[in-house]
Image (cartoon, coloured by chain):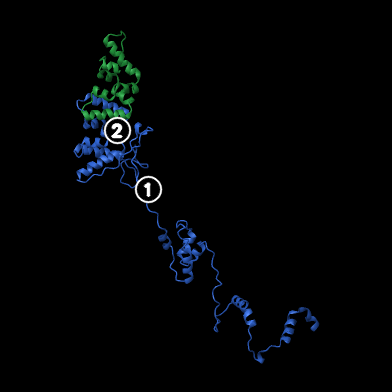
Chain colours: A green, B blue
């Protein structure tokens, strides 16, 4: 996930498209939910970039189910033409 | 968190001990305050912090909040309150926090100084970890919470009968040392009944000390005018005074003397029924 974001294989919006608010709300610990809301209230907006500033790839890998993260990576690979498989 | 007490329909909190519906009151009060401008969403979020929301709000509401925040151009307290809803806040957030919010709004609208309650205990995973310090504030010393123990002296003086007899006063003084040990509530109804009779018998019976003997009283002085005696009294008087008047020498006139020889014969003839036939 970190490499895909650093190398712009996918962007934060792609991550949030898989790691939806429902997925985040159901898998992140309460202190991280509070942290995301606090950061958004302090900044005045909640964007995928700001969410991923708080929910780092390490945190995503620790709390979000891996099949969801892998779906994000596989979809990005499909968009880049690396693979012929179609990722839902 | 249901706060209905006892059985019955909600909304009848005017009766003492009856069922109350605090949450409905909170929804009305908080919603009315926000609607009328008495309070603002920022006031609410100052008490219902993101940490409080993260602890008490269910995950579906968090998903709704994230969805709304990600789709909104501006994220502020109003968006949070409108997305979550007053009813959901009052349903899931502890009542003490909601009440603190309402109390601050009310005090401010009345121009009163609002004193914030002690911070609530927030149990998070970080606080539950072994190395972290607890978030519970240090409780005050117990001496400031507990009421002072009741003094035993008023209870003892309350049941003390007003007696004037010296003996009763002496017994009262002797019992005064044991009064604090004996609890007032441990008195038996019998002892209390005797106390109310104002005779002091109950205190004698309830006391651990042995009863004082009554032989210390001086014998009554002989009186010339004796009251009318009953048969029982005659026997007691003769029995008790027999040793005294037998040893006493009394001057007797000769005319008062009795021929004991004849009297014994008469008495013996009266008592010995075996000689009746022989004498006849």
User: The C terminus of chain B is located in which quarter?
Assistant: bottom right
Q: Which residue is mark 1?
A: B142
Q: Quadrant of residue B228?
A: bottom right
Q: Give the residue at the far front of this rendering.
A: B131
Q: Label 1, secondary structure: give it.
A: helix
Chain of the residue that carries numbered disc 1 in the rendered image = B
Q: CA distance from mark 2 to mark 1?
A: 30 Å
Indicate left or right for B20 with B186 as reference. left
Q: Nearer the viewer, residue A64 or B224?
A: A64
Res. B280 visible in picture: no
Residue drawn at point x = 46 percent, y = 69 percent = B169
Q: Quadrant of residue B64?
A: top left
Q: Quadrant of residue A4?
A: top left
In the rendered view, tell whether residue A58 sits above or below residue B42.
Answer: above
Q: Label 2, secondary structure: give it.
A: helix
Crowding near pointer 2: few (<14 within 10 Å), some, many (20+)?
many
N-terminal label among 2 and 1: 2
Across and down, in percent, residue B159 comes to 43, 62
In the rendered view, tell whether residue B23 sits above or below residue B157.
Answer: above
Residue drawn at point x = 29 percent, y = 33 percent = B51
Q: Which residue is mark 2?
A: B51
Across and down, in percent, residue B107 comes to 22, 44
User: The N terminus of chain B is located in which quarter?
Assistant: top left
Across and down, in percent, residue B24 comes to 29, 38
Residue drawn at point x = 41 percent, y = 60 percent = B153
Across and down, in percent, residue A23 comes to 31, 23
- The reply to whether the C-beta atoms of the residues labelled 2 and 1 are less than 8 Å apart is no
Indicate left or right for A10 with B272 as reference. left
């Amino acid at each position: 996930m970190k490499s895909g974001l650093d190398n712009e294989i996918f962007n934060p919006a792609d991550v949030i498209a898989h790691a939806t608010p429902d997925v985040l709300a159901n898998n992140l610990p309460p202190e991280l939910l509070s942290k995301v809301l606090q950061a958004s209230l302090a900044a005045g907006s909640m964007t995928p970039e700001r969410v991923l500033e708080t929910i780092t790839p390490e945190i995503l890998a620790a709390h979000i189910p891996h099949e969801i993260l892998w779906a994000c990576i596989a979809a990005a690979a499909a968009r880049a033409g690396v693979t012929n498989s179609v990722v839902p | 968190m249901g706060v209905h007490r006892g059985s019955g329909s909600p909304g009848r909190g005017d009766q003492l001990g009856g069922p109350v519906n605090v949450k409905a009151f909170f929804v009305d009060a908080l919603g009315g305050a926000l609607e009328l401008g008495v309070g603002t969403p920022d006031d609410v979020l100052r008490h219902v912090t993101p940490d409080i929301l993260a602890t008490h709000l269910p995950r579906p509401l968090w998903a709704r909040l994230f969805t709304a925040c990600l789709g909104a151009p501006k994220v502020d307290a109003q968006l949070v309150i409108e997305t979550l809803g007053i009813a959901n806040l009052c349903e899931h957030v502890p009542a003490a926090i909601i009440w603190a919010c309402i109390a601050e709004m009310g005090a401010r609208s009345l121009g009163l100084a609002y004193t914030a309650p002690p911070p609530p205990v927030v149990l998070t995973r970080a606080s539950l970890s072994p190395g972290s310090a607890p978030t519970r504030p240090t409780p005050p010393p117990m001496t400031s919470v507990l009421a002072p123990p009741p003094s035993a002296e008023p209870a003892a003086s309350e049941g003390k009968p007003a007696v004037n007899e010296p003996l009763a006063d002496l017994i009262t003084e002797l019992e005064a040392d044991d009064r604090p040990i004996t609890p007032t509530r441990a008195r038996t109804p019998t002892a209390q009944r005797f106390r109310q009779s104002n005779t002091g018998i109950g205190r004698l019976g309830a006391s651990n000390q042995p009863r004082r003997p009554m032989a210390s009283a001086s014998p009554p002085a002989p009186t010339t005018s004796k009251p009318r005696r009953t048969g029982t009294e005659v026997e007691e008087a003769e029995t008790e005074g027999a040793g005294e008047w037998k040893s006493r020498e009394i001057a007797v006139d000769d005319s008062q003397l009795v021929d004991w020889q004849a009297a014994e014969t008469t008495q013996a003839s009266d008592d010995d029924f075996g000689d009746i036939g022989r004498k006849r």
